[in-house]
Image (cartoon, rainbow, N blue to C red):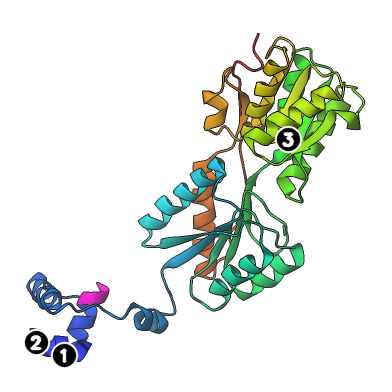
Amino acid sequence: MTIKELAKLANVSVATVSRVMNNDGVVTEETRKKVLKVANEVGYHSNLIGRNLRRRQTDNILVMLTSLSNTFCNKVIRAIDKEAEKSGYSILVCATNGDKDTEKKYVNFARNKLVDGMIILNSSITKEEMQEYSKAFPIVQCCEYVDKKFTPYVTVDSIEASFDAVSRLIKSGRKRIAFFTVDNDLISTKERLEGYKKALKENHIDFDPKLVFTGNYGYRNAISQTEAFMDSGVEFDGLFAVSDRMAAGAIKAIIQKGKTVPGDVAVTGFDNTDASYITTPSITTVAQPANDLGKEAFNMLCKLIKKEKPQNKILDYEIISRESTIN
């Protein structure tokens, strides 16, 4: 059924039907109810695609990340969704699994105006690609970023957060602190290593590359990688992991090898996810403000959609002390 046919059945003008369906303009409550009643009886649905083309707006945004298994990212996404709902937006969450072709497919959603803009939590997009995209459509980097000059971003200072976390381990008497990381190109990974090294340097401890080992964010992988690290014979009395799940796996391995936490090895994680407080012992961690990150990312994107220029934001973090570092 067309809008003209509906207008005829309801005995109103086409313009009145349009105002009712778009909740736009002044229509009496009696008329609104009459139009909606007739529309419901005949099963009429407004053509959203046509309406959006006329408005040049979809009221949808796309949130892209590599994996949905990251519980911290899920908290950020929920915050984005909650804030979007307040403004009448819906979000499309797209996981790429690190596949470049899949990333390009989702980027084309924004390039072709199928969504009003994008928030990217993490990806393999290069700095040059990000700059190109930011010229073509509204895009915001959240948590991770590759371009600081042209593309707005909201994050925490991972260098200072890691420096703070490792410094606390050192102040508690730990001198041989292992760094459990991931072999990838994410800015957070690089900055956490930088913060680790900075803490060692400022406390007059030489950096030992033998104390650095890698995993893949997984819990089981963290157990096996920590066991292999311990079997190599490297002595350590502290461990800083780039994620809570890796810290949890490391603790499991340390205890299985007959060591105690925090007695023999003090452990600190990152993100304050559920793994940090359900593990025994509970894990000292760097807490990122997931809700604020999501909220700020959405509000920054809204400004871009309105042709305004948002300011980049570095949000505060918090070190939460738990049993893994407290004797």
Residue 160 shows which numbered tag? 3
- Nearer the observer: mark 1 or 3; the answer is 1
Mark 1: secondary structure: helix
Q: Amino acid at mark 2?
A: Leu
Looking at numbered disc 1 in the image, what kind of residue is underneath it? Glu
**Dot 2: element:** helix
Label 1 sits on residue: 5
Quadrant in the picture for the N terminus: bottom left
User: How far apart are the alpha carbons under marks 2 and 1?
Assistant: 6 Å
For residue 256, above or below residue 243: above
Relative placement, left or right, of 164 versus 115 is: right
At label 3, the amino acid type is Glu
Q: CA distance from mark 3 to mark 2?
A: 66 Å
Regarding residue 18, the answer to whether it shows in the image is: yes
From the viewer's side, name the closer residue of 253 and 27.
253
Lower sequence index among marks 3 and 2 = 2
Mark 3, other Cα within 10 Å: few <14 / some 14–19 / many ≥20: some
The part of the image, by quadrant, that contains residue 256 is top right
Name which of mark 1 and mark 3 comes first in the sequence. Answer: 1
